[in-house]
Image (cartoon, rainbow, N blue to C red):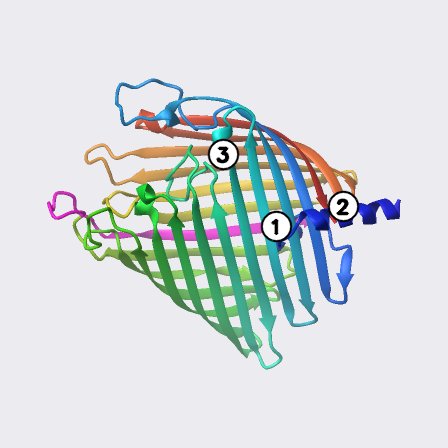
Amino acid sequence: MKKKEILIACIIVALVMVIAPVQSQAQSGQGGNIRFGNLAIIPGIGLEGLYDDNIYMGNGKQYADPVVTREEKKESDWITHVKPSLFLNYTLPERGSVNMGYQGDYAFYSTNTSNNWKNNQGSLLVDYQAPGGIIAGLNERYTQSEDPYGSANQYGIGRVTKRWANDVKLKLGYNIMANLRSFVYYGNYKQQYNDIADYSQDYTDNEFGLGAESRFLPKTWGFVRYHYGQQRFNTSAPGQTDEFNSDSKRHRADVGVTWDPGAKVSGEVSFGYQWRRYDHEYTSAARTARRDDANTWVAETAVTFMPTATMSLTTTLTRAVRDTASDTSERFTDTGIGLNLQQAILTKFVLNAGLGYSKNEYNLPVGTPRTDDNYLANLGLDYNIREWLGTGIGYYLNRKSSNIETNDFTDNRFMIFLKVLY
C-alpha cells in the first residue's frame, strides 16, 4: 500500500507546479509526508462539485429600469472546481519558520460556460525571533482573481471581474525585557482591475504603526497600538483628473489582547477608534456631492478556543469604514460577527458549522440611507479516508436583505468534494 501512496504523491507533484498557502495546511493538520531535514513539501489537489441556485446573486425580479442588468436574474448551475496546491514549510528550530504557498481554484460551469473563472494565490509567511531579542515578521499574499463573489466593499457581486491584489504586512519588534516588547509596523495593499470600466476600484493603501505589548499571563499579552494610513486611488475616470477622487488619510488607536503560539486560546482581540479625513471634499467640479469625514470605532477580532483536543471554536468581530468607489461620496460602516465550530467525531469525521451576520450602513441616499443585513451559514462533514485522502459534503448560505430591493438576494450552494494532501 505504501507504493501506491508514493505513486499518488508523484502524480500530484506532476500536476501541481506552484506553491499553496501554509494557512490551509495548518488548519487541516494534514500533509507533511515529504521531508528533507527541516523542509516539508506538501502537494495537494482538490476536486469539488457544487450546485449553486443563484450564480448571479440576483433577486429574480424584473425591472423596467434599463440600468438593472442580468445580475438581477436568478439562475442555477452546476460548477466543477479544480483546486491544485503546494506548500513549502521550512522550520528554524527555536527561532521560527518560513512558509511559502500557492493555491488555485479553477471553476467550470456546466451551462453558463462564459462564466468560467480562475483564482490563483501565492503567499509568503516569515516568523523569526533572534537570540538578541529582535522579532521579525513578514506576511505577503498575492492574488489574481476572477470570481463573482465581489470584494469587501460589495463591488462586483454576481459578475466575473478580473483583478489582482497584493497585500504585504511587516513587523519588527524588540524584547525590551521578559514581559515587555515594542513593535513597528508597515502594511501595503494594492488592487487593480483589468477592465477600465472598473477604474473606480483601483487603489493603493499604505499604513505605518507603532505598538507596545506587556505580558500579564504566561502566554497572554495586552497591547496598545497607533496607526497612520493613506489611501490613494490609482485610476481616474476617462477624461477626468484625480482631483475629485476619494483619497483619504486616517489615524487609528487600538487596544487589545494577543496570545503566544501554543496557548489554548489563539488569535487577537483588538478594538480601537479611527479618524478619517478625505483629501477632496467634492466628487466633481459641479460641487453637488460632498464628502464628510468618517470617525468611528473599529475592531479586528478573531479568537480561536480549543476546550478539548477534538474541538475548536472561533469567534470574530469586525468593524470598518469602506468606500464604495473613487468617484462618489458613498461609503458604509461594515460591522460583522461570526461563530465557527470544528468538532472531530470518532476518528475519521470532522463536523464544520458556522454562522455569521454583518450590517452595512451607508451614508446615501440622503434621507433614506441604504442598509443591508447579511446572513451567512455553513454546515459540512469531512471524512478522512486516509491521512492524506479525504472527502466530504457541505452547504453554504449567503443572504442579503436590503431596504433597497434591487440589492436583495439569497444564494444556496450544495457541494461534494475530494481532496488529497500528501
Residue plotted at (66% across, 40% down) = 46
* Position of 7 relative to 58 (above/below): below
* Position of 54 relative to 149 (above/below): above
Quick one: 346 or 398, which is closer to the camera? 398
Residue that carries the numbered disc 3 in the rendered image: 376
Residue that carries the numbered disc 1 in the rendered image: 305
Residues rendered magenta in the picture? 283-307
Residue that carries the numbered disc 2 in the rendered image: 388
Q: Say few, some or many: other residues with alpha carbon within 10 Å of mark 2 (under 14 / 14 to 19 / 20 or more).
A: some
Task: Please indicate whether residue 348 sits to the left or right of residue 65 in the image.
Answer: right
* Position of 376 relative to 187 (above/below): above
Instruction: Please tell me which of labels 1 and 3 falls first in the chain.
Output: 1
Amino acid beneath label 1: Phe
Q: Give SS at disc 3.
A: strand
Instruction: Please tell me which of labels 3 and 2 falls first in the chain.
Output: 3
Mark 3 and mark 2: span between their CA atoms? Answer: 30 Å
| Residue 134: quarter of image | bottom right
Residue plotted at (32% across, 25% down) = 405
Mark 1 and mark 3: span between their CA atoms? Answer: 21 Å
Q: Nearer the viewer, mark 1 or mark 3?
A: 3
